[in-house]
Amino acid sequence: MTTLREINERCSALYEDLNFGYAREWKAAKPGRKVVGHMPFYVPREIIHAGGGLPLGIFGGGDQLEVIHGDAYYQSYICRIPRSTIELAVTKRLDFVDGMLFPSICDVVRNLSGMWKVMFPNVYAKYFDVPQNYRDDIGGTFYINELNELREGLGKLAGRRISDDEIRASIVLFNENRRLVREVYAFRAAQPWKAPAADVYLLMRAGMTLAVEEHNRMLREYLDAADKADARKRDNCRIVVTGAFCEQPPLNLVKSIELSGCYIVDDDFLLVNRWEQSDVAVEGDPLANLAHAYLHNSAHTAAKYEDTEKEKGMWLVDSVRKNRAEGVIFACPSFCDPALLERPMLQRVLAEHKIPFVAFKYAENSGQMQPIREQAGTFADSIKLWSVQ
Amino acid sequence: MNARAPKEVVKEASMLKQKEMISGNYAKLASAKEQGRKVVSTFVPGNLNELIMCFDLVNNLPEINAIQNGMRKKTGGYIMEAEKRGHSEDVCTYVKADLGMIAKGNLGPDGHPLPAPDALLLSYTGCFTFMKWFELVREQYKCETLMLHVPYEGDGHATKNMRDYIVKQLKEVIIPGLERVSGVKFDIDRLREILRESAKAESHFVWVLQSAKNKPSPIDAYFGGVYYVGPIFTAFRGTPDATEYYRLLRGEIEQRIANGQGPITPDGEMKEEKYRLVVEGPPNWTSFRDFWKMFYDEGAVVVASTYTKVGGVYDLGFRHDPDHPLESLADYCLGCYTNRNLPSRIDLIEKYVNEYEADGLLINSIKSCNSFSAGQLLILREIERRTGRPAAFIETDLVDPRYFSPANVKNRLESYLQMIEQKRRSGIAPPAAAMPGAAPAAAMQ
Ligand code: SF4
Ligand code: SF4
């Protein structure tokens, strides 16, 4: 049986490998294989998989990458992730990537899609739009057509048409992946001392690289091993982290939050792995099923329009309740418009529901954790004090 | 030619006309509630002014309020107020200027109270911030919000799917919503009439922009351009007033061309055109006059700008079309400048540099605006590479006075102009602009 330590080591190695050795090997193993990169927050990975491709989540360079060229493309007041992504590309760390998808998360990623077209004209680069209208006959129709266009583009890359059956088979695999991811999240919410936040983060991050079949195996192994773990429960408070759905916090930040006395019981780090909140239907038109799931059964994030004022931020309140959290930490990347514009609205809703919160900003390469540790520590103390009173 | 230039700046008929139109709209807003008129707030890029007119709604444009307040130096305080209330220092200052204004009593730029809107028409194009902006404003007013999602032209062109999606939203969400808010039934023939009027103004407007191909250019297509776009980008497109404004403006420019005159600046007529520039990015508003002065003091004229295309790239041929009313509204929304992908933006700027015989490209990079700013350094390199003409970069903000450093901007501009001189001496840049008084370009319509 695989031990937690082995899983953790594997995940760390994948996380630290900015040359994407696994994906390179995967591609080299069979002629004609294609790797399709994608940025946060969501793309229908099923379609890439159905075309025989490997979806590869590109989530910036973290704190290990020295950004030299990337800074020449961005002003100081733009977040880090696009510059480290450019750095990865111009330093040829992505030279094996055949396609890049840029989801409609914000204007920075949107414009990066065009930069990719100019800088890497031989790579299939696509801005991937999602509907902000949630009616099946309006946003749904639009989205099915967009999915079709993506299917055609990826089909050209694959050198064949991607069939409905292939997409259905991929939906089955990704349903399983999402189910297992949700299980890990539920496990952590129930026994966070057995599933440290940094370990869970690395485990999820591995899913941005590994083939889904392999990640599914790993998730199962993790659940088995973590359940048997002999870990001591600490007197930590329980918090939800939000705002980190695009540029990723450095791993040290995730660790620091926990070290300062907060168990993370929910987060929005890598939303793509549980975007659809229950199984996508398998029978029938697979693109219509993906569209239906997007419109009616997907997670919430700042990139999505909330069409009713009443519902604004309620997903966060629900997450706090469901996961028995005692507070929320807003951890947002500096200069991140969607996260930072959303923040005051979510804070208002939390205040109305008397849920305490604290906020700070980070960059993927932030090195100084002391202030964050202090802030999170003070927050944890105040929650404990508050719950005693 | 300068002998004819008046010592004092005389307001031309078109300027007076525009002033009257703008103050008229603010007066309408101030008296809307009293007069029982419904108010809709909406954004400039991809706005549906013609549709709004069909429902007799009064149009409130938060971006324009922010600009007007910026020029009146009120936004610094508003932005600080919003930041005090928890809005991040990192986000777009238009949003904060608006929220700060609302927090401080919602007095419009003319000092009169702005009415609470009856609906927020969240029809926008080319920027994600708009969506968050109206979600934030919705919290204040709790009024109906009508969302029109305009897809981005990621592959450099509109598709049938995008157009159909917009038309469907117009038919099933926006029009029924506006009927509900206004109590007025939609009449497509009325829309056609208004669109017909829009198209007239649009053709005059294009003529105005293209007059800058003359040497000297009779207009400044950036600092002057932001005034010229006023009626067509805002609450007046589709009104006879707008058409009249452009007719007057066109007449004045025709006269300037015939006289071989350059643009009118706040200090009177520009003396000599030494440099012809293309500018990318919005201007700074809080020090707008000082910013402009730095250019005209050096004899630098902006002959084409991208900012004057945020409310429509009419010079590429688009006109609102009464025969395809909803489809043409969709095409309009899709085609605005910041809804075009980066390669298309580069192509457009390259075309401007060449067609307007510019000395180069200057980018005014705006801290607030990721929609414009993200990728501009690549634009700069590409334009230099493709045209062989120098490009330069300055950084300011829209309405946050903390981010306008006059010394810095002036230095950069001066070094840039020196760079152009050097290029000229080495024979790479195109010849200096023809002397004032040269014959107007034969190609002018
Ligand atoms: S971190 Fe925020 S602003 Fe930056 S690319 Fe991601 S969503 Fe956009
Ligand atoms: S980010 Fe730019 S386009 Fe968007 S609202 Fe702000 S200034 Fe306007």
Image: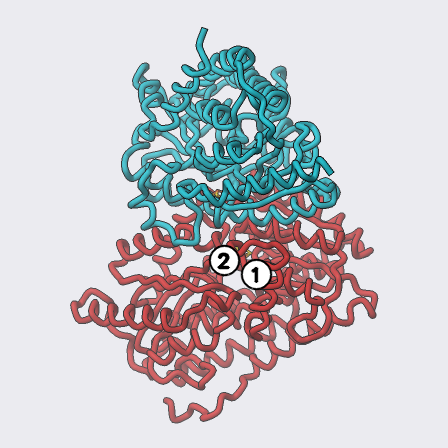
Chain for disc number 1: B
Question: Does residue B111 appear left or right of residue A198 in this picture?
Answer: right
Query: Camera-side residue: A92 or B184?
Result: A92
Rendered position, B402 above or below B8:
above
Chain for disc number 2: B
Q: Position of residue A154 (x, y in %)?
A: 43, 27
Q: Which residue is mark 1?
A: B94
Label 2 beta carbon less than 8 Å to ligand 2? yes
- The residue tagged with tag 2: helix, strand or loop? loop
Q: Which residue is mark 2?
A: B368
For image coordinates 41% across by 53% down, the residue present is B345
Colour of chain A in the rendered structure image: cyan
Location of residue A120 by image quarter: top left
For image coordinates 67% across by 33% down, the residue present is A320
- What amino acid is found at the position of numbered circle 2 in the picture? Ser
Location of residue A233 by image quarter: top right
Question: Does residue B117 appear left or right of residue B445 in this picture?
Answer: right
Colour of chain B in the rendered structure image: red
Question: Does residue A1 appear left or right of residue B112 in this picture?
Answer: left
- The residue tagged with tag 1: helix, strand or loop? helix
For image coordinates 68% across by 63% down, the residue present is B102
Q: Position of residue B40 (x, y in %)?
A: 72, 59
| Number of numbered discs | 2
- Report the Cα–Cα distance between label 2 and label 1: 8 Å
